[in-house]
Image: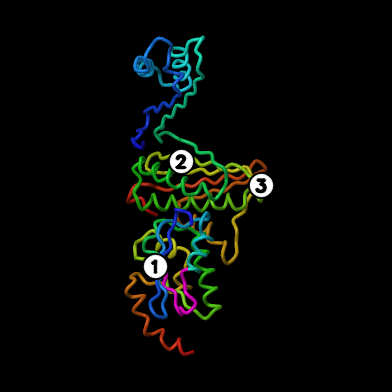
Amino acid sequence: MSDLARVEGEQQGTICLVRVHGEIDLSNAHEVSSEIGYAMGQEARRLVLDLSDITYLDSAGVALLLRLAERLRSRRRELQLVVPRGSPVRRVLDFTGLPRVIPLESRLEDALALRDHALPDDFS
Amino acid sequence: MEASFRLVPGSTLLLFTDGLVEKRGASIDEGLERLAAVATGSGQDIEAFCDQLLCSMVEDDTADDVALLVIRPVPLTGRPLLRVPAEPRVLAPLRQTLRRWLRESDADPQLANDILLACGEVCTNVIQHAYGANEGPLEISLDVRDGTAEVTIRDQGCWRPSSGVHGGHGLPLIQELMESVELSGGPDGTVVRMRRGVSDGSDS
């Protein structure tokens, strides 16, 4: 993994929380995507991807997120992003219309609190 | 041994092998003192600086070989130009330089972020599309004047704004971030010229 970004994953029941720190551009987007894949366990139903500590993300990062969402959807898993309001990353995502495609919360607590609503999905 | 020292723009770092300061019949300390005296009195031009050091310090019959490395950080004022290979690995260092550039130009941080992002998008396009599988250069220059930043990014290949589900965010994003974007392509390459106010309040 290049030192441009760091990926940390943690399992919380059926939720996998993955935090990415640093910068995402063309040079490391694929690497970051693979790291997110490794961090997400087989049993997770939902991936909460916390981008609060991302200081730079451009369209290479947006493409990564769209591909990730598609991949998860095809495996009947959900993707939820956490991006604080007012952060540079939020601005990029808003510009590209990404929040219309991938659910996005400003606060991690809110994303994790959705846990209960996702429960019926576990029995589908 | 490890040490760190901040090189401010205009300062000079001189690295040399011992042949420069060693002289038969004199101590190294004397040699170092002589070097300090010569270096302090030398002018601005870095080539002339090296020539003068070599002329003053090295005698014709010197037994040892001499290597010199002179590094001088230049201030990012005026209209500097960066020329780098169009490869993904240059993106992060380019951003670092642009950040510093914009900071030294007193750009509003939020607007500086927008400019940084727009530059990143254009450079990414150049890296992905300008040269196909071949290598080629990427040039970027920034000029901040009368509260407006003008960035020019140039290559010697050809590329068109990409479209498609995953590749089509670059150009609309650039247009959203900058006040004006001109793209001109020809047989010699592609030039993208973008402008954006850098003072808070001139936000579009």
- x%, y% of residue A99? 44, 70
Residue A101 at what x, y percent from top left? 48, 73
What segment carries the magenta color?
A39-49
Compared with residue B114, is residue A111 higher up or lower down, i.e. above or below?
below
The residue closer to the viewer here, B22 or B162, is: B22
Question: In front of the other: label 2 or label 3?
Answer: 3
Q: Looking at the rendering, in which quadrant would you find the N terminus of chain B?
A: top left
Q: Position of residue B193 (x, y in %)?
A: 52, 45
Residue visible at 54% across and 50% down? B88
Marks 2 and 3, the one that precedes in the sequence: 3
Image coords of residue B34 (percent x, y): 36, 14
Could you tell me how far apart the alpha carbons at marks 3 and 1 are, in whole angstroms?
A: 37 Å
Please name the amino acid that badge 2 sits on.
Answer: Leu
Q: Is mark 2 on a helix, strand or loop?
A: strand
| Residue on which disc 3 sits | B134
Q: What residue type is labelled 1?
A: Asp
Left or right: A63 with respect to A113? right
Neighbor class of circle 1 (other Cα within 10 Å; few <14, some 14-19, many 20+) is: many
Q: Report which residue position mark 2 lands on.
A: B142
Instruction: Report in which chain the residue with disc 1 lies.
Output: A
Chain on which label 3 sits: B
Q: Distance between the residues labelled 2 and 1?
A: 34 Å
Q: Find residue B164 and report its image quarter.
A: bottom right
From what the image shows, is residue A94 above or below residue A103? Answer: above
The residue wearing badge 1 is: A50
Q: Residue at x 40, y 18 (%)?
A: B43
